[in-house]
Image: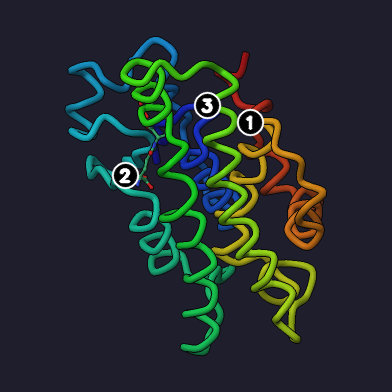
Amino acid sequence: MKLHNFFRSGTSHRLRIALKLKGLDYRYIPVDLRTEEHAGAAYRKINPQGLVPALEQDGKILLQTPAIIEWLEERYPTPALLPRDPDGRARVRALAALVGCDIHPLNNRRVLEYLRAQFGCDDAAIEAWSATWIGAGFDALEALLAADPARGRFCYGDAPTLADVYLAPQVESARRFKVDMSRWPLVAAVDRACADIEAFATAAPALQPDAS
Ligand SMILES: N[C@@H](CCC(=O)N[C@@H](CS)C(=O)NCC(=O)O)C(=O)O
């Protein structure tokens, strides 16, 4: 498999974690967001949307991390990233969607660049914007975790699931935007539990070949 990705991209980070949890090897193909490589013609042949990551296998290109991770789950079911029962699956998917649909897209690079270019936002304004949407999402996540009587070390139970695969990169991004994580002790505790697992530790942005 070839993983077209960028070390600091949250969605790339999410997919690296899922691949590593499944024990799958991949070739790391860096796509540099700093030089707009993702917007160029060569990468748009892989993903016309000009977004990373993309996963290539046997000449097929898979796009959109929710679809790619569900494909991995179906193709390589062990270890499972979703619980067996429908209620558990709905819960885990909801926690993942809270991050993937309602936090991450608002803080995407192209959104922040648009705020800078069209509305003259400076670094402080960008940090305030990002902190607002990360905070709103993490407030809800913290409440959901607190209300779950069966909660274990992770978002759902005592083994990592899809929800943790989404959560850990979002916490990493929150730190990059200088968001104080002490407001969400349960979210921070889940992130620490994830960091103890090799798949999460080795997927970290700072350890990737294009990190600088
Ligand atoms: N919904 C897409 C989102 C992908 C995405 O937003 N990727 C970001 C990096 S985390 C990107 O390529 N951004 C480029 C830009 O904003 O210019 C997915 O889950 O794969």
Residue type marked 1: Phe
Q: Residue at x 53, y 46 (%)?
A: 133
The number of numbered discs placed on residues in the rendered structure image is 3
Earlier in the chain: of badge 1 and badge 2, it is: 2
Q: CA distance from mark 2 to mark 3?
A: 37 Å
Residue type marked 3: Ile
Q: Quadrant of the C terminus?
A: top right
- Estimate the x, y position of residue 130 in percent, counting from the top left: 54, 37
Residue 156 appears left or right of 105:
right
Residue bearing the label numbered 2: 57
Which quarter is ligand 1 in?
Answer: top left
Q: CA distance from mark 1 to mark 2?
A: 34 Å
Tell me the crowding category of disc 2: few under 14, some 14 to 19, or many 20 or more residues within 10 angstroms, Cα based: few
Residue 67 appears left or right of 107:
left
Q: Residue at x 72, y 67 (%)?
A: 154
Residue bearing the label numbered 3: 126
Q: Which quadrant would residue 179 be assigned to in this image?
A: top right
Residue bearing the label numbered 1: 177
Q: Is mark 3 within 8 Å of ligand 1?
A: no
Q: In the depicted view, which residue is nearer to us: 3 or 34?
A: 34
Whether residues under marks 2 and 3 lie with C-beta atoms below 8 angstroms apart, the answer is no
Marks 2, 3: nearer the viewer: 3
- Estimate the x, y position of residue 98 in percent, counting from the top left: 49, 61
